Amino acid sequence: MGWEAGRLRHGLLVFHSLTNGGSELALWQANATEEKLRQAFPDVEIVRCVIKTTGDRRTDVALSEVAKSEGVIDKGVFIKELEMALASQEIDVAVHSLKDVPTVLADSFIIPATLERAGIRDVLVSKQPGGWQALPAGARVGTSSVRRARQLQWMRPDLQIIDLRGNVPTRLRKLRDAEDYDAIMLAEAGLARLGFLPNSDDRLFFEIMEEQVFYPAAGQGAIGLEVRSTDPWMKSVVESIGDVDTLLRVNAEREFLRLLDAGCHTPVGVYSALSEGQLSMSARVFPEAGGEPRLSSVQGPAVDAMELAKRLFETLV
């Protein structure tokens, strides 16, 4: 790879990059990206710029209310400040939890690479063993995700869903130490990255929900690397550390979500699997007004990933 003029400083290449909201999970994601960059470019100096986003700061109200007050669409509350820093060239790469990124970006930005994907499943964490089927009648389950809430209430209509936001350790502490919740829902990837899986707390019980039973979010478990669309050099840098199979899968999942025009308020789960050049996709979509979900699956050559996403969409409209 050739270095652009002006990028070399005292014999080192400086990336102003690796932004995140400062939470433990965001820092883990930044560390993972930084390690990949150092392995690929051992002589490069990396400068980390920690930027706390509106979505990270405002955990006192629902995401929909935060988005409305900030004048952004749904998940834009998690990327607004990062994209401002990209646009001003304060940073060169923004590191995201991809499930929290809108499916449509401004023309100024692209996500050309993702790190290798972690587990895509959801986890029910409860105060008693037995998983979701053993929860007592009327149990209170904490989550801020409408996707998780609707699937839980579809499986167990008696459950009470209580809005719960905050970082992973905070949510676990609230479950363990307070009486407000009988269980909470979290992502497998975040729990594993922070060392909570395998279970290290003898007062809590972790049930990993298989994706065929409890459909995950598009892009769940993936770390996306966002750069300026006008910076082909940085695009090539992040592509060099990206995982091609992960990118193919998450792009197909996000394309399905884009075609569905689904945001934070739409209860939809979608997942994909790649094997021997074949891509399979499955989706579960709940009507916003309530009622039974629509389910569908498609399979075909992985090279036709975007067309498969379109086929999946067309089977559900």
Image (cartoon, helix red, strand yellow):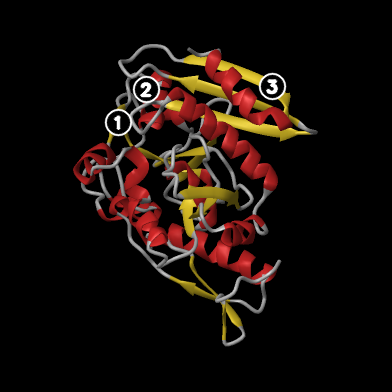
- Contact flag, marks 2 and 1 (Cβ < 8 Å): yes
**Residue 153, labelled with which disc?**
2
- Camera-near label (1 vs 3) is 3
Q: Alpha carbon of mark 1 to alpha carbon of mark 3: how far?
A: 34 Å
Q: Single out the residue that lies furthest toward the bottom.
A: 10
Residue 151 lies, in percent from the top left, at 42, 24
Q: Alpha carbon of mark 2 to alpha carbon of mark 1: how far?
A: 8 Å
Q: Residue 182 falls in which quadrant of the image?
A: top left
Q: Is residue 230 above or below residue 47?
A: above
Residue 23 in sight in this render: no
Earlier residue among tags 2 and 1: 2
Residue 263 shown left or right of residue 12 in the figure: left
Secondary structure type for disc 2: helix
Residue situated in front as seen by the camera: 285 or 127: 285
Instruction: Kindly identify the amino acid type of the residue bearing the numbered disc 3.
Output: Gln
Q: Residue at position x 42%, y 60% from top?
A: 86
Instruction: Kindly identify the amino acid type of the residue bearing the numbered disc 1.
Output: Ile
Q: Residue under circle 1?
A: 161
Earlier residue among tags 1 and 3: 1
Q: For the image shown, how many numbered marks are present on the structure?
A: 3
Residue 219 lies, in percent from the top left, at 53, 40
Residue 240 lies, in percent from the top left, at 67, 58
Q: Residue under circle 3?
A: 299
Q: Residue at position x 54%, y 38% from top?
A: 121
Secondary structure type for disc 3: strand
The crowd level at tag 2 (other Cα within 10 Å; few <14, some 14-19, many 20+) is few
